[in-house]
């Protein structure tokens, strides 16, 4: 992904105004037809559908269709106005004033008239997001804001605690309506709003079926002009192989992330477009450091030495990826290329376990103080894709060779999330993170982010890492921030709270009837209101 132009990184040194001509609720004027439906396949189903409590990519994609931020990012990765028609930034970089559009309405609740979007909604969103009882990974990203004030019904002012790099882009967080949540103080996962959201975006939630299919319909009053496609339907699949077959048999029109094993088959079918997109992401095995057996970094590092990652990448993903060494997304400006991935070395792994006090027992399993090195590995979705099943089986086999007993357990997606993020009932997990371009790893590795539904699920804690994360956020010097992040990369790679695996090349597949398809590398559907289906191919 391209970084934003340097002029935007220095934006706090002068007053900046951005303008967008007002556009009422009307049809787009690009001459493209309206109509048709898009049924797309997801590997799993969303847990919540609001932009505050959600922390998975399946939810994120739906949320992108329902909600807007004050600003957005266009196809050139440049900041553009959304709910704010313009903004002003003070010379000291500490005051951001947003002048809101006056032609925006919230999706109407059933039987009610639409409610206008106003400044109170922006203030409400910020306050509920930062409330101590709202469990969200967003808090740590917006701690730089000191206050938000309503100037009038269509003007809000944010005061920052300090100037920060590229602050304007951070105001892309999604705004929710003051009249949306049942609880006006904080947002919980039990609030009806998280399953029945209303936003300002191009699509409105119609219903969620008994099979957890999420049905969205076009917002005729969308302030950028009605989106072309009438309906989006997100269909959940528990098996990637079945999802690929559904595409090939025209049961769905799009897969947002194609199983790598199915790429040749899809690529060879002239009905479909196979489109790569460069998400900043990586896969990993994550460790629960609350378990005394995993508290010693030598044990965690031994596991990384024991696993032949290149062999797995070549065998299960046709080599379409890159082995990684640390916590930043490969391709990001923050990734430290000088930190090389640990090489496959099972003998070194055994030596590290011996140093940590483990010796092989009579059954070949490592033992320390009478306790066997036996651990559980939890993986989301009961019927996993064949590639993931093979990764998990290979991981177990590699570790068994050095005397570690791993019991694999496949869990339904929501049950897995509860075990990992709420109950912390696991030893090892297999998962992936997807990043935006902010290179912000604070929610993953800062000790303040340990707790229920927070992203530091493994309870990793290091005061030096905490300090460096804070310092990285405080600096206004981009090169200094890069240096700090390189150091963070080296420390976290050495401490191995994860076995960092690889970044894969992502592919979406869709029927050729879908036109003008542009994919956001992180949020996917950011530009979907411009997609269209020719009238002759609508059904």
Image: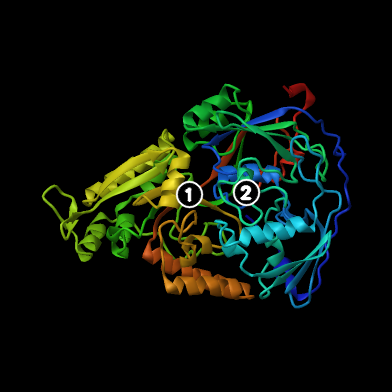
Q: Is residue 334 above or below residue 374?
A: below
Q: Which colour scheme is used?
A: rainbow
Left or right of 460? Residue 86 is right
Picture quarter containing residue 495? bottom left
Is residue 450 visible from the viewing direction of this image?
yes
Q: Which residue is drawn at 63% across and 50% down?
A: 51
Left or right side of 110 for 131: left
Image position, residue 92 (x, y; %) = 75, 78
SS for callout 2:
loop
Q: Is residue 347 above or below residue 111?
A: below
Q: Which of marks 2 and 1 is in front?
A: 1
Does residue 3 appear anywhere in the picture?
no
Q: Which of 53 and 226 is in front in this view?
A: 53
Viewer-closest of 210 and 427: 210
Residue furthest bottom as drawn: 92
Query: Callout 2 environment at 10 Å: few (<14), some (14 to 19), or many (20+)?
Result: many
Q: What residue is shown with label 2?
A: 521
| Disc on res. 432 | 1
Figure quadrant of the C terminus: top right
Quadrant including the N terminus: bottom right
Please tell me which residue is depicted at 88% across the width and 47% down the height of the picture.
23
Q: Is residue 413 left or right of residue 440?
A: left
- Between residue 392 and residue 146, name the one nearer to us: 146
- The total number of labels drawn is 2
Cα distance in 3D space between marks 2 and 1: 15 Å
- Location of residue 320 in the rendering, given as x and y in whole percent from the top left corner: 48, 44
- Is residue 298 rendered to the left or right of residue 535? left
**Which one is earlier in the sequence, the residue at label 2 or at label 1?**
1
- Position of residue 123 measured from the top left corner of the image (x, y, whole percent): 73, 60
User: Badge 1: how crowded within 10 Å, few (<14), some, or many (20+)?
Assistant: some
């Amino acid at each position: 992904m391209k970084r934003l132009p340097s002029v935007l990184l220095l934006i706090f040194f002068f007053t900046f105004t951005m303008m967008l001509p007002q556009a009422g609720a009307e049809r787009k004027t690009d001459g493209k037809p309206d109509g048709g439906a898009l049924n797309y396949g997801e590997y799993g189903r969303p847990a919540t559908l609001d932009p505050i409590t959600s922390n998975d990519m399946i939810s994120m994609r739906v949320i992108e269709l329902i909600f807007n931020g004050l600003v957005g990012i266009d196809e050139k990765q440049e900041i553009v106005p959304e709910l704010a028609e313009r903004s002003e930034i003070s010379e000291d970089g500490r005051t951001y004033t947003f002048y809101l559009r006056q032609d925006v309405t919230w999706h109407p609740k059933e039987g009610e008239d639409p409610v206008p979007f106003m400044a109170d909604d922006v203030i409400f969103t910020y306050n509920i997001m930062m409330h101590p009882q709202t469990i969200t990974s967003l808090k740590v990203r917006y701690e730089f804001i000191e206050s938000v004030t309503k100037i009038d019904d269509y003007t809000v002012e944010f005061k920052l605690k300090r100037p920060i790099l590229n602050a304007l882009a951070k105001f892309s967080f999604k705004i929710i309506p003051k009249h949306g949540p049942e609880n006006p103080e904080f947002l919980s996962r039990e609030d009806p709003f998280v399953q029945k959201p209303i936003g300002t975006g191009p699509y409105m939630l119609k219903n969620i079926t008994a099979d957890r299919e999420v049905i969205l319909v076009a917002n005729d009053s969308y302030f950028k002009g009605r989106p072309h496609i009438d309906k989006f339907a997100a269909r959940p699949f528990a098996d990637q192989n079945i999802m690929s077959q559904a595409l090939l048999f025209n049961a769905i029109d799009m897969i947002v992330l194609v199983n790598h094993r199915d790429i040749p088959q899809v690529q060879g079918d002239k009905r479909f477009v196979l489109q790569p997109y460069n998400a900043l992401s990586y896969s990993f095995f994550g460790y629960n450091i609350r378990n005394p057996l995993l508290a010693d970094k030598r044990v965690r590092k031994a596991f990384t030495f024991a696993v032949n990652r290149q062999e797995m990448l070549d065998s299960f993903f046709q080599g379409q990826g890159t082995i990684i060494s640390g916590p930043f997304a490969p391709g990001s400006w923050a990734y430290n290329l000088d930190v090389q991935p640990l090489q496959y070395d099972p003998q070194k792994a055994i030596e590290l376990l011996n140093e940590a006090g483990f010796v092989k027992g009579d059954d070949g399993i490592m033992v320390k103080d009478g306790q066997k090195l036996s651990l559980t590995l939890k993986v989301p979705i009961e019927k996993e894709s064949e590639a993931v099943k093979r990764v998990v089986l290979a991981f177990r086999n590699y570790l068994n060779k050095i005397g570690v007993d791993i019991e694999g357990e496949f869990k339904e997606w929501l049950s897995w999330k509860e075990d990992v993020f709420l109950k912390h009932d696991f030893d090892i997990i297999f998962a992936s993170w997807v990043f935006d371009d902010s290179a912000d790893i604070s929610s993953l590795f800062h000790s303040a982010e340990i707790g229920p539904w927070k992203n530091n699920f493994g309870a990793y804690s290091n005061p030096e890492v905490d300090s460096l994360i804070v310092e990285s956020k405080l600096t206004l010097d981009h090169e200094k921030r890069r240096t700090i992040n390189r150091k963070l990369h080296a420390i976290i790679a050495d401490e191995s709270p994860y076995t960092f695996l690889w970044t894969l090349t992502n592919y979406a597949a869709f029927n050729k009837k879908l036109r003008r398809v542009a994919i956001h590398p992180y949020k996917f559907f950011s530009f979907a209101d411009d997609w269209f289906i020719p009238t002759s191919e609508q059904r």
